Image (cartoon, rainbow, N blue to C red):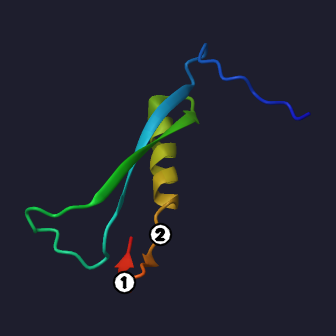
């Protein structure tokens, strides 16, 4: 059986971050007043030495999850 680290925040080095994600067409009118975008938040538990380092890790995690695809209507999405 593999050793699993117990999550204890006694040292104050665990942070919960919420990464906001959205899905919308690549070509869009961002000035459109009533623009609708599918948006959701995912929570992640991050181990870091400081809130600043946790933030940096969260930004990196969010950037790594960015991608583009073509949907069934042949529209490029991101």
Most distant residue in the left direction: 33
* Vertical comparison of 22 with 29: above or below: above
Residue underneath mark 1: 73
Q: Earlier in the sequence, mark 1 or mark 2?
A: 2
Q: Quadrant of the N terminus?
A: top right
* Vertical comparison of 62 with 26: above or below: above
Q: Position of residue 18 (x, y in %)?
A: 42, 40
**Residue at x-position 55% and y-position 34%:** 45
Q: Position of residue 2 (x, y in %)?
A: 88, 35
Q: Quadrant of residue 28?
A: bottom left
Q: Which mark is residue 67?
A: 2
Number of dots carrying numbers = 2
Q: Quadrant of residue 24?
A: bottom left
Most distant residue in the front direction: 72
Most distant residue in the top direction: 10
Q: Quadrant of the C terminus?
A: bottom left
Report the Cα–Cα distance between label 1 and label 2. Answer: 18 Å
**Residue at x-position 42% and y-position 78%:** 71
Quick one: 26 or 51, which is closer to the camera?
A: 26
Q: Position of residue 43 (x, y in %)?
A: 47, 39
Quick one: 8 or 69, which is closer to the camera?
A: 69
Quick one: 28 or 54, which is closer to the camera?
A: 28
* Vertical comparison of 76 with 47: above or below: below
**Residue at x-position 45% and y-position 30%:** 51
Could you classify mark 2 by the number of other residues whose Cα lies within 10 Å: few (under 14), some (14-19), or many (20 or more)? few
């Amino acid at each position: 059986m593999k050793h699993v680290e117990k999550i204890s925040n006694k040292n104050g080095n665990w942070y919960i971050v919420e990464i906001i994600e959205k899905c919308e067409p690549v070509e869009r009118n961002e000035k459109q007043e009533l623009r609708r975008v599918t948006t959701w938040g995912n929570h992640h538990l991050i181990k870091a030495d400081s809130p600043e380092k946790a933030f940096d890790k969260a930004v990196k995690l969010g950037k790594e999850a960015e991608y583009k695809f073509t949907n069934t209507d042949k529209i490029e999405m991101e």
